[in-house]
Amino acid sequence: MHAGTHGDDVAVPAVRSKGVSMSSILDLVDRHDKFRASALNLQASENVVSPNVRKAMSSDLISRYSLEQDGDDAYGGTRFAREILHQVEGEVSSLFGFRFAEVRPIGGHIAAEIALLATVRRRENIMAIYEEDGGYTGYVRGFLPDILGFQSYRIPYSRERQEIDYTALEKSVSNISPRAIVLGQSFFVRPYDLKRVREIADRSGSLVIYDGSHVMGLIAGGEFQPDVSRYCDILLGSTHKTFFGPQGGVILTNDEDVFENVRANVTWRTMDNYHPNRVAALGVAVEEMKRHGKEYARKVVANARKMASELSERGFTVKYAPWFTSSHQVILDRDPAYVKGGSCVRVSRVLEENMIIIDREARVGLSEVTRMGLSDMGEIAELMQRAVEGQDVRKEVSEVVAKEKMQFW
Ligand SMILES: *Cc1c(COP(=O)(O)O)cnc(C)c1O
């Protein structure tokens, strides 16, 4: 229906001279594109997509609907959209080694919401890694638990070691009997002892849900938490942080009942249309990951380790020395971030003035520069150091950016 747009015979007011505002948005998009194309992106939550992923993303599918119902579709013209959806489901399951995949969630957060709706009832409990320990804000009070009507408890966690306190977890789980133990972090540098978590969960009949949003590309490439499909009931996450896809989310499981419940919580409960162009683009990304994921993930983690030690040698306070990281992230200490530099927010701003982008939360991410073929971490670390010390390094940064060339597609 088009109620309210062209419905009544009310004269359309003379706002047709939209030319100005239309082109100014396009102009801003253009400026954004040029800006980001000339900057070195080290944000841990972001990645670049290949020309083929972009092609699928901007195809005709961008404005289409498809909604399967009783072996048919509520819409017409969906023959290829449906074939794409089913093929992508199959490819995502085989890539991650799970029996079932739900690829329609439009983000990692929505994937988490769907997975929790599918498995936890009102007034039941979950345990999650809290924000203060690097966990995802969505799992703490005020957010998903409040919306969905359950209590969230903190998974005991040692910040210094970046490790779950398994002995304390065992106690808490037996007291709380959570319906689900939700693992995964937004500040994520070390995998878990999943065998141990599984044993603890089994004693209380709890599910183990793994939010791999940040590390999906590394899991796919076999570099991070390779035992996730063996020990977890659900793996969910974003498709665009270390993975090669456009922004979106996936849910994976081996359990048919869980999968049925996941399916039942998508259409009309958490979303309606699923952005078929996005699913097609995800499919292209999965094909790229199948061909190149191993090499990509290995290089990302190697570059992160190298970057951590290069930054550390240049006076940055990098957390978790001497091992630093097992993922794509290098985490700088907030206070003080740099011996002469003050807080990480300032460091991030100063770097951005010099066309090097890290987030304001002190994470340095190596996925994008790795995908763009850069391998000299010392060179980047040195530019970061000089920028933080007050030098203008924009020219040198643009020379590094000029060397970037997309790999793995
Ligand atoms: C980024 C993130 C999310 C949210 O993902 P979106 O794709 O942005 O919706 C959820 N969980 C964790 C652990 C994250 O880091």
Image (tube, grey):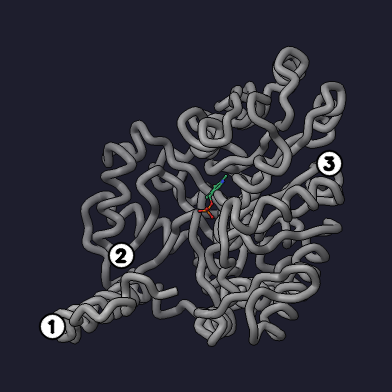
- Answer with left or right where residue 154 lies relative to residue 120: left
| Mark 2 C-beta closer than 8 Å to ligand 1 | no
- Answer with left or right where residue 300 lies relative to residue 40: right
- Rendering coords of residue 142 (x, y %): 46, 31
Name the residue rendered at 50%, 55% in the picture: 45
Front position among marks 2 and 1 = 1
- Rendering coords of residue 123 (x, y %): 64, 24
From the viewer's side, name the closer residue of 349 and 172: 172
Dot 3 surroundings within 10 Å: few (below 14), some, or many (20 or more)?
Answer: some
Q: Pick whichever of labels 1 and 3 is earlier in the sequence.
A: 1
Secondary structure, mark 2, is loop
Residue 12 image-quadrant placement: bottom left
Dot 1 surroundings within 10 Å: few (below 14), some, or many (20 or more)?
Answer: few
Q: CA distance from mark 1 to mark 3?
A: 62 Å
Q: Is residue 336 above or below residue 86?
A: above
- Answer with left or right where residue 167 lies relative to residue 277: right
Q: Which mark is residue 14?
A: 1
